[in-house]
Amino acid sequence: ITGLPIRHVGEHFQRSNDTISRYFHKMVAVFALEPFYSKYISLLFTSSATTPHPSICENYRFWPYFKDAIGAIDSSHIPAAPLLCDHAAYHN
């Protein structure tokens, strides 16, 4: 989810474009199958599209920043908990 083209990822990891593409498609297939999909992906139209997740609503640290949020643009929400040292990379 870097937004980089296959060519740049292949260059970074010193692998061919074919190898990067093949493993990318394998990972997409894994993410689309059960149990990963049903456990980690929740579509907003299955719950209230205008209400943030209860864990956000009940947390006084997050609620002021999310009180007007309506959800993800692409109708999905994927919970993430990066390590503290990686938090800056996950902002915005």
Image (cartoon, rainbow, N blue to C red):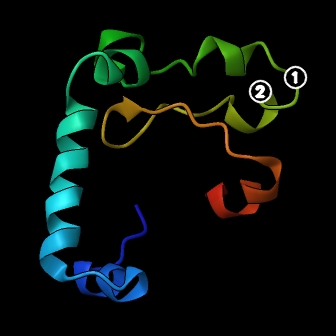
Q: Is residue 66 left or right of residue 5?
A: right
Q: Pinpoint residue 8: horizontal percent, then vertical percent.
A: 33, 86
Q: Residue 5's mark?
A: none
Residue at point 47% right, 21% down?
Answer: 50
Residue nearest the observer in this picture, 10 or 89:
10
Residue at point 73% right, 57% down?
Answer: 86
Q: Residue 60's mark?
A: 1
The residues bearing labels 1 and 2 have C-alpha atoms spaced at a distance of 5 Å
Q: Which residue is mark 2?
A: 63
Q: Quadrant of residue 7?
A: bottom left
Residue nearest the observer in this picture, 54 or 25:
25
- Residue 75 in the image: above or below residue 6: above
Q: Pinpoint residue 84: horizontal percent, then vertical percent.
A: 82, 49
The number of discs equals 2
- Crowdedness near tag 1: few (<14), some (14–19) or many (≥20) residues, C-alpha within 10 Å: few
Residue at point 30% right, 16% down?
Answer: 35
**Residue type for callout 1:** Tyr
Residue at point 26% right, 46% down?
Answer: 27
Q: Is residue 26 left or right of residue 52?
A: left
Residue nearest the observer in this picture, 53 or 26:
26
Q: Pinpoint residue 14: horizontal percent, then vertical percent.
A: 35, 86
Name the image quarter holding the N terminus: bottom left
